[in-house]
Amino acid sequence: MLSDTSMAIMMEERLGSLDIQEFMSFRCAFFMENFTKGLGFVEQAKTGSFVAAFRGDVAMPMIASTDIAEKVVEALTTDTLPEIRIRELQGARDYTLAEATHILATALGIPEVKYSQVPIEEAHKTMIAAGVSPSFAEAVMETAKSFNEGNPMALEKRSRENTTRTTLEQWAMEQFARK
């Protein structure tokens, strides 16, 4: 089975072989929006726990979709196409799921929420029960399997070029101020 990163590289190579002058690819970290749009963090937090299939003790890069949009707009509005056509975007920094749970729960005003890793099958069922499409749930589970096996979420070392501005703390305060 191919990792998410291997599949992305394979797709980039296929698209790159089409010799499209304007082709650009953005490899993005774990979306912060996954917590609210797929993993049901708010609903789970109300029970005092948050469960997912990802290891809670290994940090991963997390990014806000607004930061991705800014980088795409920047690339599309320059006078010349950038030389580097594949851009990796990692977010402001890396977080463990245990740390992310604390940050998100604190922003919600429920700081005692605990993170627990659950088996892939259980996490998949939880996502489906929350109304997520089967194909999206499968994609998240493949990402979790790859991550749990030690495959990195990022291929590049963190740099000024691949680090974006929004921290999970900022994102959570903005998201949950509306709740």
Image (spheres, helix red, strand yellow):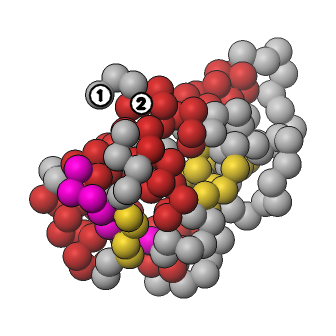
User: In the depicted view, which residue is nearer to us: 21 or 116?
Assistant: 116
- Please name the residue shown 56% across and 74% down the image: 57
- Please name the residue shown 29% across and 52% down the image: 45
The amino acid type found where label 2 is placed reads Gln
Q: Is residue 107 above or below residue 49?
A: above
Residue where numbered disc 1 is placed: 179
The amino acid type found where label 1 is placed reads Lys
Q: Residues within 10 Å of mark 2 (few under 14, many from 20)?
A: some
Left or right for 53, reference 125: right
Task: Report if residue 124 is visible in the image.
Answer: yes
Left or right for 102, reference 5: left
In percent of width and height, residue 98 lies at: 49, 64
Q: What span is colored magenta in the figure?
A: 46-54
User: In the depicted view, which residue is nearer to us: 15 or 59?
Assistant: 59
Q: Is residue 178 above or below residue 19?
A: above
Whether residues under marks 2 and 1 lie with C-beta atoms below 8 angstroms apart, the answer is yes
List the single residue furthest toward the front. Answer: 112
User: In the depicted view, which residue is nearer to us: 145 or 60?
Assistant: 60
In percent of width and height, residue 23 lies at: 67, 38
In percent of width and height, residue 115 lies at: 40, 66
Q: Which mark is residue 175?
A: 2
Q: Any magenta on residue 176?
A: no
In percent of width and height, residue 163 lies at: 75, 43
- Please name the residue shown 17% across and 60% down the image: 128
